[in-house]
Amino acid sequence: MSDPVIRIAARGDGVTASGRHVPFGVPGDVLHDRGELLPGPHHQAPPCRHFPECGGCQLQHADDDAYRGYLGSRIETALAQHALTTEIREPHLSPPRSRRRATLRALKVGGGVAIGFNAAKSHRIVDMRECHVLRSELFALIAPLRRLLGDLLEPRRPAEVQLTLVDGGVDVLLKEIAADDLQSIEGLGAFALAQDLARLAIDRGLGPETLFEPRLATVTLSGRPLGFPVGGFLQATQDGEGVLAASVREAVSGGTRVADLFAGLGTFALATGAIYAAEASRDAAAALKSAVPTMAVEHRDLYRRPLAPDELARFDAIILDPPRAGAEVQVRALASRAVGRIAYVSCNPATFARDARLLVDGGYLLEWVRPVGQFRWSTHVELAAAFSGRG
């Protein structure tokens, strides 16, 4: 008797018609009684030698059709848990080798340095020798960083390496390294110059210190360059940012007084011509205000101090782009106040669905959701959604 795989579960296992979970199963595969998985038409050969050991990818064995189905299914399932349905639009997939930011780990091992993502469900570092998700500019730094960190890592103490591709090259932030003497600092500066970095900063536990920044490190959003804070947030891929921004513009179309809440550097505020932005990061808020002096930018923690209904009355369209925890407190205020349009960008279908239920109960209509797969071959799902308000 055979048991076909019909979907991919949240953590990446295949699920059969009888409810059995099968590692590396995708829809179209068939599980036989003796436990053998027969690959179907949507099962592909993983392109990377590190799969499935490396925790950076969980779904390299799924072809694009299966991966798109997974993204849509994750959102449908999350909404169904709150008795919600809506139009799920065609998912967008970022192409291979398109991620422009990554946080890696580094550790002294034997006579060298291992650098890469952690192994799946482990703190062990998989030494990266190839990568099919990172931009080439980021991957090109792995071997030079391996050589650099040999003298800067403390035994048995992992370091963190943050890489972000900005306008002038790669922005590098190193955490937990031993760089307390002049020779180490000079070596870091020489490395930054030789690799033509946009910036190099270190964090020895007291906050980032910039060691090399020949020109102000900037990112360009909607054609406008902004100073990029050390360790700042940027959408994972340029194409993903474009799809999310277009979705947000559509969701708030018709609004003339737009507010961007959890604004970050203003990715969506700039894309929509928002008149107000609120952001908890002081550095990000300052960068946006400096770049757009005419925009009302407020340094504000919306978890502690959400916009109240009377403040929301100033706007006819709201953009929400909260962290993974969602925006429950702010959404409750929105649910009690009629706003014409809401665009909601989320990196967590579960908290999005919870907040969507609150908005729908408050009289809003969930019009559509667009899944976005910026983190290629991972179980990380992002989305943009449109709500219309009462009256």
Image (cartoon, helix red, strand yellow):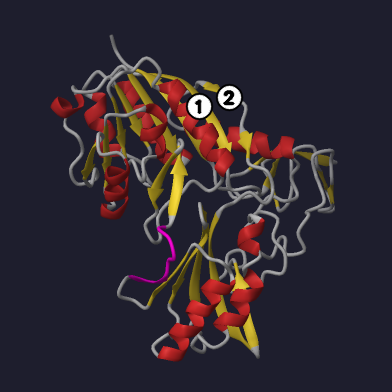
Question: What kind of residue is marked 2?
Answer: Arg
Residue 94 or 38: which is nearer the viewer? 94
- Tell me: residue 355, above or below residue 55: above
Question: Is residue 126 in view?
Answer: no
User: Is 30 placed left or right of 266 in the picture?
Assistant: right
Q: Position of residue 121 (x, y in %)?
A: 58, 65
Q: Residue 378 has which mark?
A: none
- Tell me: residue 93, above or below residue 151: above
Name the secondary structure under disc 2.
loop
Question: What kind of residue is marked 1?
Answer: Val
* Residue highlighted by disc 2: 89
Question: Is residue 340 in view?
Answer: yes
Q: Position of residue 235 (x, y in %)?
A: 49, 46
Q: What span is colored magenta in the figure? A: 208-216
Extreme-top residue of the structure: 391
Q: Position of residue 213 (x, y in %)?
A: 43, 66
Q: Residue at x 67, y 69 (%)?
A: 128
* Residue highlighted by disc 1: 369
Q: Is residue 215 magenta?
A: yes
User: Is 172 placed left or right of 332 in the picture?
Assistant: right
Instruction: Quadrant for the N terminus, please.
Output: top right
Q: Residue at x 63, y 56 (%)?
A: 134
Return the disc, 1 or 2, that comes first in the chain's sequence.
2
Label 1 with label 2: CB-CB less than 8 Å: yes
Q: Position of residue 385 (x, y in %)?
A: 45, 27
Quarter assignment of residue 15? top right
User: Is 256 placed left or right of 182 in the picture?
Assistant: left
Q: Is residue 104 magenta?
A: no
